[in-house]
Amino acid sequence: MQKIKIKNADIVKFISYFIVFFLLFFWYNKTNSPTFSQDFNSASIYSQEEKKVVWNEGFFLWEKKQEKPYLTINFKPDYIKIDPNLIKVLDLNIKSKYFKEKVTPLSLVIDWERIDPRWQVSGNSLILTSKAKINSETIKVFVHELGHIVDIYYLNDNAWFDKSEDFYKISWLTYNIKNKNAKITDFVSGYSLSNKYEDFAESFVFYIFHNEEFLRRAKTNYSIKLKYNFFKNYIFSESEFNNTSFWSWSIATYNWDSTKIWINLKKYLYYIR
């Protein structure tokens, strides 16, 4: 009998240790995410619509309430104005089949006082300076920020496992410490070397706007190949953006910021519409 008691005590102790370890592991992963990753899950289907149970002639029905808008726009202060054509272009991006299910519902805040950074993700909002103009760089920076939302919310929809970790571990040991063997050529831009989140967002931009160049580099660089395949397998379907070319001239081997590489904006907007 004494032996059985010892074994049962060991089992209880093991389960207790496991629960404590899991809670600490979960807390560590959350606290090492960007600050804006804590309070909004933009990809959850339950954040887009609400349902309630209704009794109807002897049986229950699920009644869908009005869906939340996929995009809300607020101005700070209320009286400021912004180019309406820019809003149309941003709206076209958000509601396109390539992004909508991954980034909505989304709140866009137009801020008069914001100068730098031009864009910023904060909670469930994407904040934009009211001085933004319609051009290649503005749209690419916008897509860069959508990349952060895809990374933090869409891929982290499962509380048990963050799929983004498969991307991070290609080049990163921690938030901003790279793998020992990581090289500059393993990254699509200089800015992507800042930390694992910027690496994801810059690679997201490169996959969308410079897919052909991304694929070309993947043929000679294994880390680039893994990053390319990550977006191909887990974010977009195999045909989406495959071998697309929206830029107007050749791309240098090294660029600090991929959003500075000029593209043919009309060609891109025609593709996603």
Image: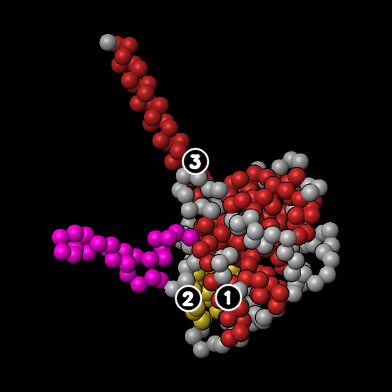
Q: Nearer the viewer, residue 198 or 32?
A: 198
Residue at the location (55% across, 79% down)? Answer: 110
5 is higher (above) or lower (below) than 225: above
* Residue at disc 3, secondary structure: helix
Q: Determine which quarter of the picture holds residue 56.
A: bottom left
Q: Where does residue 140 sit, x and y in percent of width and height?
A: 68, 70
Residue linked to disc 2? 72
Front-most of 272 and 43?
A: 272
Disc nearer the start of the sequence (1/2): 2
At x 61%, y 84%, the residue is 85
| Mark 1 or 3, closer to the camera | 1
Task: Pinpoint residue 180: horizontal percent, then vertical percent.
Answer: 74, 40
Q: Nearer the viewer, residue 223 or 110?
A: 223
Q: Dividing the image into 4 quarters, which one contains the N terminus? A: top left
Mark 1 residue crowding within 10 angstroms, few (<14) / some (14–19) / many (20+): some
Instruction: Magenta stretch: give its range.
Output: 43-68
Whether residue 205 appears in this view of the structure is: no
Residue 1 part of the magenta-drawn span:
no
Percent position of residue 231, x then y: 64, 54
The amino acid marked with disc number 1 is Leu
Q: Which residue is mark 3?
A: 25
Q: Earlier in the sequence, mark 3 or mark 2?
A: 3
